[in-house]
Amino acid sequence: MIKRVASTIFLWGIAGVCLFYFGGDASVWLLALLSSGTQWEFYKLLEKMGRRPFKNSGTALGTIMIVIPYYASKAEHGHIEGIQSGIIAIAIVACCLRILNERDSTDRIETLGSTLLGLIYIPFMLAFLVRILELPGDELQGLMLVAWTVAVAKFCDIGALLFGKAFGRHQMSPKMSPKKTWEGAIGGCLVSIGVGYAISRFGGDLMPPFFNPFWGTLFALPIAIVSIISDLVESVIKRRADQKDSGKFIPGIGGAFDLTDSLILASPVAYLLIGVIS
């Protein structure tokens, strides 16, 4: 518990310093770093399940999917959606060419499917945070929306842990994640709602004018719920691979996948909700 809290504070501090000095560019590169680490760990988990994805090329394409569209859009050379679709198309072509020479006939389709699954499930989904960054048309306001999204999703995880330890009695999903309880989930949602309100209320002029405390509070609940589901999906993957944590380099947390798990499904939901009112 102590290690997890300390790691969380440390990571938020690093992110805050980077964003303060380097702004949107830092947020995109931090996201790309986390995404590539998550995607690599995801591929390693798939290998433990007997799959043989193209780890190096898949992870490289995933990093490109996050970084290139951002700078192309910033330079007004294209739209993020179109560029990302192009990268996925290139990935499909590249994987199809590689499996003809580098995999035998017994696992070519599995290699293609597992590589593309990692590309779509990790960087494509996390890249919605970059889209949120560009929604207001002002970089600082966009960063606040991204910070709001990340805080709502991740503090749900922290709240669920604390409430679960204190009041947890009824298991949410014994087969997928025995330690998660309904009491913890409810507590996590309440914490997310409070965090969502606080950031939108006290963010002041840093927040976009359209994102008032009403929306900040209302949208926090569905994002919290989806973040719990996203966390459960990672638990299913790790259980199938017979592995407790996706990695070990973050004390008390695990690997990059353990850090970003709740954001994978929460990011596109947040983008869609915020996009409705922007």
Image (cartoon, helix red, strand yellow):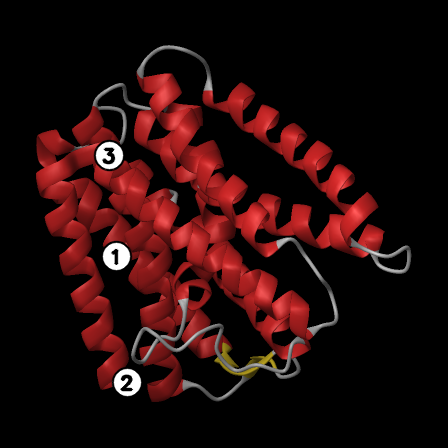
Q: Is residue 76 above or below residue 55?
A: above
Question: Residue at position x 10%, y 50% from top?
Answer: 17
Q: Which residue is mark 1?
A: 194
Q: Are marks 1 and 2 in contact (CB under 8 Å)?
A: no
- In this orientation, which residue lies closer to the viewer: 83 or 175? 83
Under tag 3, what secondary structure?
A: helix
Q: Is residue 212 visible?
A: no
Q: Amino acid at mark 1?
A: Gly
Q: CA distance from mark 1 to mark 3?
A: 29 Å
Residue 104 vertical placement versus 255 (above, below)? above
Where's residue 82, x and y in %?
A: 55, 19
Using the image as rendered, state which of residue 227 and residue 6 is in the foreground.
6
Q: Amino acid at mark 2?
A: Met
Q: How many marks?
A: 3
Identify the residue position indicated by label 2 in the image.
1
Report, in whole angstroms, how far the alpha carbon at label 2 lies from the one at label 3: 32 Å
The kind of residue on which mark 3 rests is: Asp
**SS state under label 1:** helix
Whether 126 is drawn above or below 233: the answer is: above
Residue carrying label 3: 25
Front disc: 2 or 3: 3
Q: Quadrant of residue 144?
A: top left
**Residue placed at 71% from the left, 41% from the top?**
95
Q: Position of residue 91 (x, y in %)?
A: 64, 36
Label 1 or label 3, whichever lies nearer to me, is: 3
| Mark closer to the chain start, 1 or 3 | 3
For this view, does 214 lie left or right of residue 224?
left
Q: In the picture provided, is 84 more to the left or to the right than 189? A: right
State which tag comes first along the sequence, 1 or 2: 2
Q: Quadrant of residue 87?
A: top right
Dot 3 crowding, Cα within 10 Å, few <14, some 14–19, many 20+: some
